[in-house]
Amino acid sequence: MTAPCLMLQGTASGVGKSLLTAALCRIFARRGYRVAPFKAQNMSLNAAVTPDGREIGRAQAAQAEAAGVEPTVDMNPILLKPEGDDRSHVVVHGVPIGSLTFREYGERRGELFSAVAASLARLRATHDLIVIEGAGSPAEINLSAGEIVNMRIARLADAPVLLVGDIDRGGVLAAFVGTLALLEPEDRARVAGFLVNKFRGDVTLLAPGLEMLYERTGVPVVGVVPYLERGLVPAEDSLDLEDGVPRRGDTVLDVVVVKLPRIANFDDVEPLAREPGVRVRFAAAPSDLAGADLLIVPGSKSTIADLGWLRQRGLAVALVAAARAGTPVIGVCGGYQMLGQALHDPDHVESPETSAQGLGLLPVVTTFSGTKRTVPVRGRVTADVGPFGAACGEPIQGYEIHMGRTRVDGGRSPFRVIDRGGVATDDSDGALAFDGAVIGTYLHGIFANDGLRRAVLAWLAGRKGVAHDPRWGCGERATARYDRLADAVAAAVDMKAIAALVGL
């Protein structure tokens, strides 16, 4: 039997489609259904690695976790990783197929849509329900003829559509009416309900507006979801950076993340932000580094270009000065490469430049190649000094997504890798300098390891002379967060009506 599909589309980007998709996955999974998320095409620099070493959007991996199933490439058959205003690194079924301009991508939409259709068919054959997430807005009529992520997918799946709007930004009723007005009649008829998201205050005050909305459109509002705490699911794209990172309580420790123009996998820092008393903020100018207890240089989709940006903004000099003054610095993936002595790109894999000088803080040299490594990793901490020192011997897990190979010229490494993608290995990862206070690693997800996170925060607190919080490193399990999300959404929407849309 082919599984029914329910689709969430939005009046704009950033209205909460990913969050509500995860919530519905969790709600229906708790009712005993085999649920899978699906997003045909995701444009995001936040990626995850599936158990078989393929790359998909981080949001779809989180939605799969919420549904209680393993993430697969079929849940996000096309991942676009922007490299500039008109070019993206294109990943199909978890494997890179090249760097394409918007026009080049359009010329291949036929084969790409076939890949999307095949993925959806496989999911429908093995699950009871597919919860589909759209992208942006279906009312972008300049793109509608060639889109393969919104109404074309709804037609392919014969799915009812719930239209999500963000009331916190204002104008949500106009956005609902305007979106419907711009849709073709066939697609307009698919919109079965509105979901008002991010509402604050007394919902009864909204009632007159919702009644007028129904009178004008004939489409019911099936839920008014309150403004939920941020961080319940991983951040999706750079829009999520505009509001910063959620913070719990008064600031005890100040973690500063360099806001690279092409920042990738910035959700690496979210486990730190969920800790009480830890403030995570983003820096785009040298003055933003002032007062930092820890500096993090995150991943980048265009490492050499972002390294040039660091120099143009004066951040390169400021980072080096901070490190030499004793402020701990951690570089992850592209950030690790930037902290080294040099970066070489002889085949112009990611840059028109052949080489670039690094920040010189770590004894490493990186050479880019066309072979991409995407693999889940298990290992243990080997650093015995610096922020990671108290976690020495602790098991860790994470994942690698990179196209560079880095040679370490002496010194110690922070991690020993014992398993890559289910294959036993015995390999070092990363580099240390400045008595372990400057750290580089290829491993994403390291701060999701409770023991390591606890050790880092305790070391920072001791260095600063403030009390260690015993709650650090005792983070809430992801399953508990998804349950809280599901409880909040289920209480705010008409689940009976939503279930009826898909015959469940």
Image: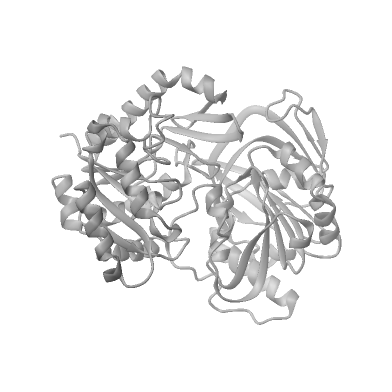
- For the question of whether residue 157 can be seen, the reply is no
* 281 is higher (above) or lower (below) than 62: below
Q: Residue at x 76, y 43 (%)?
A: 309
Q: Quadrant of residue 186?
A: top left
Measured as percent of width and height from the top left, residue 394 is found at: 59, 62
Q: Is residue 252 left or right of residue 147?
A: right
Residue occupying image coordinates x 80% and y 49%:
362
Residue 163 versus residue 53: which sits nearer the camera? Answer: 163
Query: Can you tell which quarter of the image residue 3 is in?
Result: top left
Q: Quadrant of the N terminus?
A: top left
Residue 194, image x, y percentages: 27, 51
- 356 over 348 or under it: above or below: below
- The answer to whether residue 127 is visible is yes
**How many numbered tags mark residues here?**
0
- Residue at (80%, 55%) from the top-left corner? 319
Q: Position of residue 60 (x, y in %)?
A: 41, 45
